[in-house]
Image (tube, rainbow, N blue to C red):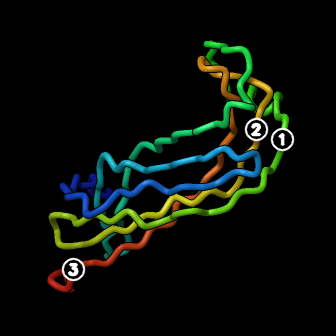
């Protein structure tokens, strides 16, 4: 029987905003906020797992504004209303998040934009709604005290 994962407290060293410039002059800022970290043993080795929340801020130029709409859309709705698929983007700023765990380990995480599409749908401000896909990279450096 596998042991239950143990929650590990942590301190945030840095959780920077990543920034991307989209082909339609929109600015996308993303940030991943870590909420919890657990550690379990797998084949005699520490296995760390994190749970967090992605945050996104989209700053749309006025020329793209339309009629405001307060409706909540499902991922299926977004996919069915793609206006500009696979948009070009440029990375303005992208950094690693860093966390120092109470067990001495350090976790680095980086969320990177992989694909973005603009939909025909609008949010409550009249801005286009974007369908954003990211990928998370994780590095763990265990404490030398554990070895």
Relative height, residue 68 to residue 49 (above, below): above
Q: Residues within 10 Å of mark 2 (few under 14, many from 20)?
A: many
In what element is the residue under mark 3? loop
Q: Which residue is mark 1?
A: 84
Q: Which mark is residue 118?
A: 2
Is disc 2 in contact with disc 1, using a CB cutoff of under 8 Å? yes
In what element is the residue under mark 2? strand
Q: Earlier in the sequence, mark 2 or mark 3?
A: 2
Q: Which residue is mark 3?
A: 143
Q: Position of residue 35 (x, y in %)?
A: 31, 46
Mark 1 vs mark 3: in front: 1
Q: Residues within 10 Å of mark 3 (few under 14, many from 20)?
A: few
Q: Quadrant of residue 85?
A: top right
Q: Name the residue at 22% across, 66% down.
A: 100
Q: CA distance from mark 1 to mark 3?
A: 46 Å
Relative height, residue 109 to residue 44 (above, below): above
Q: Is residue 39 left or right of residue 83?
A: left
Q: Name the residue at 82% across, 34% down.
A: 82
Q: Name the residue at 29% across, 49% down.
A: 36
Q: Position of residue 52 (x, y in %)?
A: 39, 46
Q: Earlier in the sequence, mark 2 or mark 1?
A: 1
Q: Is residue 85 left or right of residue 38?
A: right
């Amino acid at each position: 029987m596998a042991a239950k994962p143990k929650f590990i407290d942590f301190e945030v060293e840095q959780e920077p905003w990543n920034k991307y410039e989209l082909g339609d002059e929109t600015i996308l800022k993303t940030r991943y906020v870590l909420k919890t970290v657990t550690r379990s043993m797998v084949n005699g080795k520490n296995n760390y797992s994190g749970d967090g929340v992605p945050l996104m801020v989209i700053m749309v130029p006025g020329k793209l504004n339309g009629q405001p709409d307060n409706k909540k859309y499902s991922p299926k709705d977004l996919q069915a209303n793609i206006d500009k698929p696979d948009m070009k983007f440029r990375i303005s700023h992208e950094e690693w998040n860093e966390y120092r765990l109470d067990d001495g380990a350090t976790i680095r995480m980086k969320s990177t934009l992989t694909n973005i599409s603009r939909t025909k749908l609008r949010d409550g401000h009249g801005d286009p709604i974007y369908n954003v896909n990211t990928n998370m990279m994780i590095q763990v450096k265990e404490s030398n005290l554990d070895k």
